């Protein structure tokens, strides 16, 4: 055993370096230097990760409201017949504000895609809640507390749960429902930048039923297909106002 340790510590290989419970030997000074640099880089990355998670500016956030069309009026189906929607409930699982693509790429490069996505979702989601798409009264959904940065997109996810389907739409002729889980990412017309100088922003999500029935034929009902079609039409019509 003493002979083996003597070989490791010979001048040709350099002195032994203990790592945990093992002995690590270096064939050259450059290899030892490279390993030291990698350890230093790892320490820097970990420090940046903790700094990123802890770096929040008090008061930085986005107020979210939601409202339907002020006067949806008659909704036309595929045959051109008019319907007056009596009830339309939509279950929103979450609403999240997403960083601009270039900032997401930088965050992903630093933290790794999985950690970056989990961290982003953890700090920027509201929900779940159920909205009445026939009521034009604006509803305050809450405040997204987020990290400072530049944000370009809003992601809306809808899903049913034990209390009801994703979508239920009803008039005096038919009832259409869907249990599908869907999402839509909406690009903001003007990106939001939040920092010490601009701590708060306001976003208003608008829901429209105007085109929800344009591909539905009440004369040839298909519950599953009709539900998917109406849900897709409502998601496609979602819009965002920012100020």
Image (cartoon, rainbow, N blue to C red):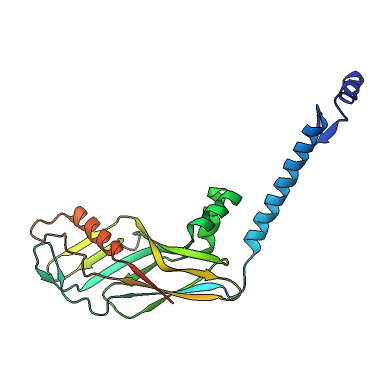
Q: Work out whether residue 74 can be spotted.
A: yes
Q: In the shown orientation, is residue 240 left or right of residue 26?
A: left
| Residue shown at the point (57%, 66%) measured from the top left | 147
Residue 161 picture location, percent across and down = 36, 59
* Among the 4 quarters of the image, the one containing residue 5: top right
| Residue shown at the point (36%, 79%) measured from the top left | 138
Looking at the rendered image, the quarter that the N terminus falls into is top right
- Residue 33, compared with residue 146, is above or below; it is above
Looking at the rendered image, the quarter that the C terminus falls into is bottom left
- Residue 45, compared with residue 128, is above or below; it is above
Depth check, front residue: 152 or 202? 152
- Residue 64, compared with residue 35, is above or below; it is below
Residue 158 picture location, percent across and down = 35, 60
Q: Residue furthest top?
A: 3
Residue 18 picture location, percent across and down = 83, 34
Q: Work out whether residue 96 can be spotted.
A: no
Residue 29 picture location, percent across and down = 82, 32
Q: In the shown orientation, is residue 205 left or right of residue 112?
A: left
Q: In the shown orientation, is residue 102 left or right of residue 139?
A: right
Depth check, front residue: 13 or 91? 13
């Amino acid at each position: 055993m003493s002979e083996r340790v003597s070989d490791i510590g010979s001048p040709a290989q350099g002195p032994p370096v203990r790592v945990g419970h093992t002995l690590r030997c270096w064939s050259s000074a450059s290899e030892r230097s490279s390993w030291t640099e990698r350890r230093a880089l790892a320490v820097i990355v970990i420090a940046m990760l903790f700094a990123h998670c802890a770096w929040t500016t008090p008061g930085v956030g986005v107020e979210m409201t939601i409202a339907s069309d002020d006067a949806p009026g008659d909704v036309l189906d595929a045959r051109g017949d008019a319907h007056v929607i009596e009830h339309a409930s939509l279950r929103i699982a979450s609403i999240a504000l997403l960083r601009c693509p270039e900032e997401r790429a930088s965050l992903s490069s630093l933290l790794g895609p999985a950690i970056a996505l989990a961290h982003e979702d953890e700090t920027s989601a509201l929900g779940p809640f159920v909205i009445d798409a026939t009521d034009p009264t604006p509803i305050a959904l809450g405040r997204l507390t987020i990290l400072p940065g530049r944000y370009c997109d809003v992601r809306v996810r809808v899903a049913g749960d034990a209390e009801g389907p994703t979508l239920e739409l009803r008039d005096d002729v038919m009832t259409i429902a869907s249990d599908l889980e869907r999402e839509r990412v909406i690009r903001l017309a003007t990106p939001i930048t939040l920092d010490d100088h601009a701590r708060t922003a306001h976003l208003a999500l608008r829901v429209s039923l105007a085109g929800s029935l344009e591909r539905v034929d009440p004369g040839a009902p298909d519950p599953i297909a009709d539900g998917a079609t109406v849900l897709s039409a409502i998601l496609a019509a979602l819009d965002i106002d920012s100020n």
